[in-house]
Amino acid sequence: MNFLSQKLLPSSKSSLKFLSVVIVLFCYCHAAAVKLPNNEKIPALIVFGDSIVDPGNNNNIGTIVKCNFPPYGRDFIGKRPTGRFSNGRVPSDLIAESVGVKNILPAYLDPNLKIEDLLTGVSFASGGSGYDPLTPQIVSVLSLSDQLDLFKNYIRKITAAAGEERAATIVSKSIYIVCIGSDDIANTYLSTPVRRPYYDIPAYTDLMINSASSFLQELYGLGARRIGVINLPAIGCVPSQRTVGGGINRDCSETANQAARLFNSKLSANIDAFNKRLPEARVVYLDIYYTLLSLIQNPTQYGFEVANKGCCGTGNIEVSVLCTRYSPGTCNDSSKYIFWDSYHPTEKAYETLVPLVFDTQIRKFF
């Protein structure tokens, strides 16, 4: 009899009661937070995108776009940096928990990944990536094409481990999340000279949409059916864009927000057309733009105090390698802030946003 049995299970009756409680608690940890139609069970969550849903892939590639150092991760399990661009969990983790898959969605490039981790889903996302193929090239991160290549490798791995039939079920029945595009507008278009001389905003958003459409088509061709696509947020209202484009008062940058709205209108129409063309597809448009904007414009209604700067450092410009343990002025209580650094929301903000953006739309995946 082991130590646990000796100390905590003094009799057979109490043993049974104790084990029952443990089993109930274990099952509860992975019970879906949202009610799934027809008692459906989601086998896995598979994620593509940028830093909003990168749980640490960039740790393992040669890029400066990293955050695997304090104070990132200070409110994560174990209070350690993992490569997530926040103080704690990110939307990919929260969505995985919401659909009853697991509480933490790992990075595909995590060297400690086990086969059981693969079977319930991973994230291929890479901080700094975008729909525009130039966006990931500029900062040497994984493009959407690279992420799809990794997904093909993932399919081979789960097929070898679980057999063709189970692998096919995982691929077809899982929920996929695509969260990308902000870096195209904020970085590639507005902050560098590589695109702006050749494209106005309507033309550039067309380029982004063409890439998004090709990506969705290829993902569908690989077997994905339930795909949630998160639109662009109000980029002009994130702290860094207020600083560089909001004038002396650090107002929201209307140029960035206008570009986001134009892209979103085209994305919505593209998704509608995709679903009509392919009846088996369940591609769901998930709106973060107006949801996040509501938090920013009405912070106290959602339990926040600070909406125009991040917790890290001054909160005006620090992000990634500029947000370190040595950044002066980092806040003590990030739960008062919508933004963790000058670009990425806090865990508390994500916990507010995910139920509003994703959970309310869950029936559309079925």
Image (tube, rainbow, N blue to C red):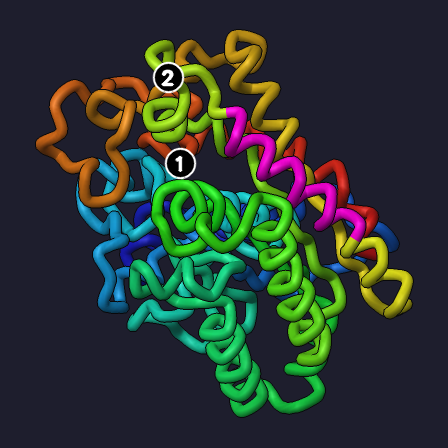
* Left or right position of 273 against 265: right
Secondary element at image label 2: loop
Residue linked to disc 2: 247
Quadrant hosting residue 319 = top left
Q: Amino acid at mark 1?
A: His
156 within the magenta span: no
The image shows a total of numbered marks equal to: 2
Q: Which residue is mark 1?
A: 344
- The part of the chain drawn in magenta is 254-269
- Name the image quarter holding the C terminus: bottom right
User: Residue 135: x percent and y percent?
Assistant: 41, 58
The percent coordinates of residue 136 (x first, y second) are 39, 62
Location of the N terminus (image quadrant): bottom left
Q: Amino acid at mark 2?
A: Gly
Of the pair 8 and 154, the residue shown nearer to us: 154
Asked if 107 appears above or below 358 in the picture, the reply is: below
Can residue 16 be seen from the camera position used here?
Answer: no
